Image (spheres, grey):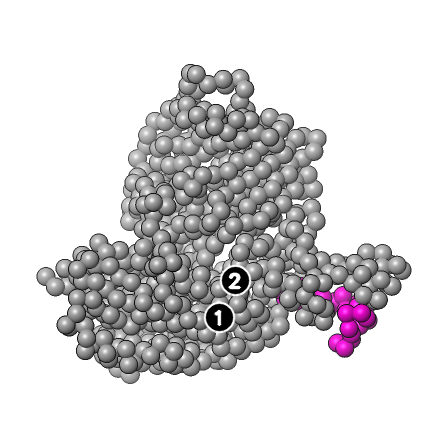
Amino acid sequence: MMHGATVRSPAARGRITGIRFGKGIPWDEFTVVRACDIPGANCISLITDDQPCLADSFVNHPEEPVVLLAHPDRYLVEEARRSVHLEIEPLPGIFNVADSLDARQIIWGDDNVFKRFQVDKGSVDAVWNDAAFIVEGEYSTGAQEQLYIENNGMLAVASLEQGVTVWGSMQCPYYVHKALVKLFDLPADRVRVIQTETGGGFGGKEEYPSMIAAHAALLAWKSGRPVKLIYDRAEDMAATPKRHPSQTRHRTAVGRDGKLLAMEIDFTIDGGAYATLSSVVLSRGTIHAAGPYVCPNVRIRSRAVATNAPPHGAFRGFGAPQSLFALERHMDKVASVVGLAPDELRRRNFIRKGETTATGQVIREDVDMGALLDHAFRESDYYAKRERFARENPNSAIKRGMGFAAFCHGAGFTGSGERYLASVAGLEATEDGRIRVLTSSTEIGQGTNTILTQIAAETLRLPFERVEIAQPDTAAVPNSGPTVASRTCMVVGKLVERAALKLKEELRLGDDCTPGDFSNACRTYIERYGPLRAFAEYEAPPGVYWDDDSYQGDAYGAFAWAVYVAEVSVDTLTYEARVEDFVAVQEVGRVIHPVLAAGQIEGGVAQGIGYALYENVVWKDGRMANSQMTNYIMPTAVDVPPIRVFFEEKPYAYGPLGAKGIGELPIDGPAPAILSAIEHATGVSVTSIPATPEILMQAWETAHA
């Protein structure tokens, strides 16, 4: 086996004029790969296919890969990497959204815009003159690093005779498979992708593993030997995608009764140098931008723009945390202007069953956001604490406050996405009545293997230990779609449930069958007919319709609904904010596994606390300047408060055993709830995150100037 390494661009944008290989390195022992060595298309195939696997003539962001190296000695590989010098003629770069939108300099397409969406409901322009209040606000969010516990890594073998096989840490084996097929110009059956045990992803191992797999496989292809390519933490943080930074403008018309009359929202995300998944992140952020509220007139304009930074990509929440942060902060501002308590304004505008979202989706679920709000306030002692803190804060240097956020999150791919994926899952039975679940859904720490086992076991009335999960391997399991978008339990779990029912039907077993009956039936069937398998392909719930052109219709089959309450303290000497207590109340359909479900919420809240207060990506000319865990500050166990999790269960008819999606929901609410609590504690409104001590100090001094 050989060890691989990547030589990356030090420049944000420029023309490659030469490559020098330094002295003192036995280059004849190395495998060296450049763009000219790629047998197929030089791209990482995803949506737009604009990102090269290896830069050829131009580089468009710092850390862009240009040259690959491999050698049996991993220490010598690192020394060699430092001895390769890229000669780049620099070109002017764009490093922020404003300059990208200005479009005086074009770095992508005709106008630097990867994607635009517009959502229209009612007649926004006809409302402003008759509104009792018009409230405007601007809000921004920074990048966030996924910081999974295990770095990215791949192992590859490749040859013209054997094809390409890769093993690695990933969320979406079939994404990697698609990319390798195009890169090597091979038939699909000559490429095999196997997910190994994966230490976390959070979206960070959705699209980028295709790049690492491509690099490892190219080195293996040229060398004829297995190649392992493992990133250290600094390279992983500097080179891989992060959460998209965002800027949002709100303009809201409100009547004297506190009812929303019109919402005009302008939502922009920074996509980095290549399109990757920005269009899908933008879509989700756009659809969620109006939140869990009913408003007769809504206009949402959104765009993803190019900058000369490494491409931003998937991260838990996928655009919704950005747009929902802006919305909930703005709703607090609207309440203040209108003269209502923040909770009262929301109660008057919560969406209910039978009403329509911004995309015109009729809510068919029995939604009661007011009840979730009451539950969260009861558990957090919201009203009593607000009154107590109002009395105590004037005489204390430590100010305390209570804040909340109300929100929803769609489960599954947006709009027609699930129909397009046409996901498949299956079950295979053995002669002794054991079951193997066949899906490409990956276990990355969130509990996929447990819940899919539960669904199969409960549907077939079998003991849990009689079910096993097949390793995600594109040569052995069907394409169940990616492990993203809060879809694994609700969508793939439903396929597993349907496949189990098909298996029972094939065996002619009723609901009263015992494990013994099942084993006997399996043995008889296999002896007579051979292998016993059942598969199910995705079918949309009835009445779900989406128009991609107008961006109207049923954006999701179902939403999860939540209210989160944060209690914070702010030290007015150091300007440090701490979350002292956190209550999370949500309705996610039936809870399949209470411990895992609570763990998802706790983990999402912890990430949300980091997003709100600590995690500040420092950019310098498109490069992450703090790409180490010593200077990229994330919350530790000391910084995370008690997180009290509560579920209200309303089974969803089209989810497995009544379940809906849960994974992304808990990242949406913490940041706006925390910033709301900071405002209650200090009287200072902060409209951007992360709210570091420097930001809070500046806001405090401005407010008290």
Residue 256 placement, left or right of 165 = left
**Type of amino acid at the residue the image marks with label 1:** Ala
Residue 433 placement, left or right of 418 = right
Magenta stretch, main secondary structure class: helix
**Type of amino acid at the residue the image marks with label 2:** Ser
Q: Is residue 562 visible?
A: no
The residue lying toward the viewer, choosing from 240 and 389, is 389
Q: Is residue 516 magenta?
A: yes
Question: Residue 537 in the image: x percent, y percent?
Answer: 67, 61
> Badge 2: how crowded within 10 Å, few (<14), some, or many (20+)?
many
Q: Is residue 338 magenta?
A: no
Locate the N terminus and report the quarter of the image it occupies: top right
Q: Secondary structure at mark 1?
A: strand
Question: Residue 22 in the image: x percent, y percent?
Answer: 41, 19
| Extent of the magenta region | 493-518
Q: What residue is drawn where x is 63% and y is 34%?
A: 157
Q: What residue is drawn where x is 47% and y is 28%?
A: 75
The residue lying toward the viewer, choosing from 93 and 128, is 93
Q: Which image quadrant is residue 346 in?
A: bottom left
Q: Which residue is labeled 1 in the image?
A: 560
Q: What residue is drawn where x is 44% and y is 64%?
A: 602
